[in-house]
Amino acid sequence: MDINPLLIPILGISCGLLAIFGGVFVKPWFKLKEQRMAVEAEMIAEKAAQYASKQAVLEERVAVLERIITDSGYEVAHAIESLREPPVSRIEKEEV
């Protein structure tokens, strides 16, 4: 197999051009992708924090409701609320 003597310099120049191309175009492209991923990660972390705060508020509300339900004063409050209903609606409920 006979190698053309011009092939070696052409391959050397091609490797150099490929390295320059990678440094000029590929490296900044990867850096841009990395920055985009960092911004997306920050946005996701912010959403997670918002969801966590909403969950804490909901857990607090559920705890209050549990305390109201298990409290013996619930029956009294329920009786007071039933007295607030108009008499007509109470009669309709009893008929149904």
Image (cartoon, rainbow, N blue to C red):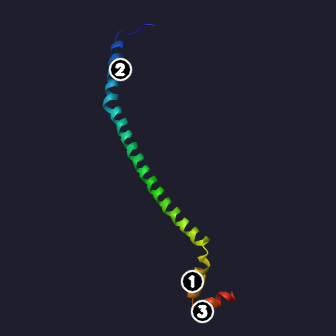
Q: Nearer the viewer, mark 2 or mark 3?
A: 3
Q: Are marks 1 and 2 in contact (CB under 8 Å)?
A: no
Q: Which residue, given by chain and number where applicable, does mark 2 sit on?
A: 15
**Quarter of the image where one finds residue 66:** bottom right
Kind of residue at badge 1 = Glu
Find disc 1 in the rendering and name its residue: 81
Q: Residue at x 52, y 66 (%)?
A: 61
Comparing labels 1 and 2, the label whose residue is closer to the camera? 1
Q: CA distance from mark 1 to mark 2?
A: 85 Å
Using the rendered view, name the quadrant where residue 18 is placed: top left
Judging depth in this view, the residue of 27 and 17 nearest the camera is 27
Residue at the far front: name it. 72
Query: Mark 2 vs mark 3: which is more N-terminal?
Result: 2
State the SS at label 1: helix
Q: Position of residue 27 (x, y in %)?
A: 34, 32
Label 3, secondary structure: give it.
Answer: helix
Label 2 Cα crowd, 10 Å radius (few <14 / some 14-19 / many 20+) = few
Q: Is residue 53 above or below residue 21?
A: below
The residue drawn where x is 46% and y is 7% is 1
Determine the CA span between mark 2 and mark 3: 93 Å
The kind of residue on which mark 3 rests is Pro
To which quarter of the image does residue 34 belong?
top left
Q: Which residue is mark 3?
A: 87
Q: Is residue 32 above or below residue 62?
A: above
In the rendered view, would you say 65 is above or below 4? below
Residue extending farthest to the top is 2
Q: Residue at position x 40%, y 50% from top?
A: 43
Report x, y in % for residue 77.
57, 80
Residue at (33% x, 35% y) in the render: 28
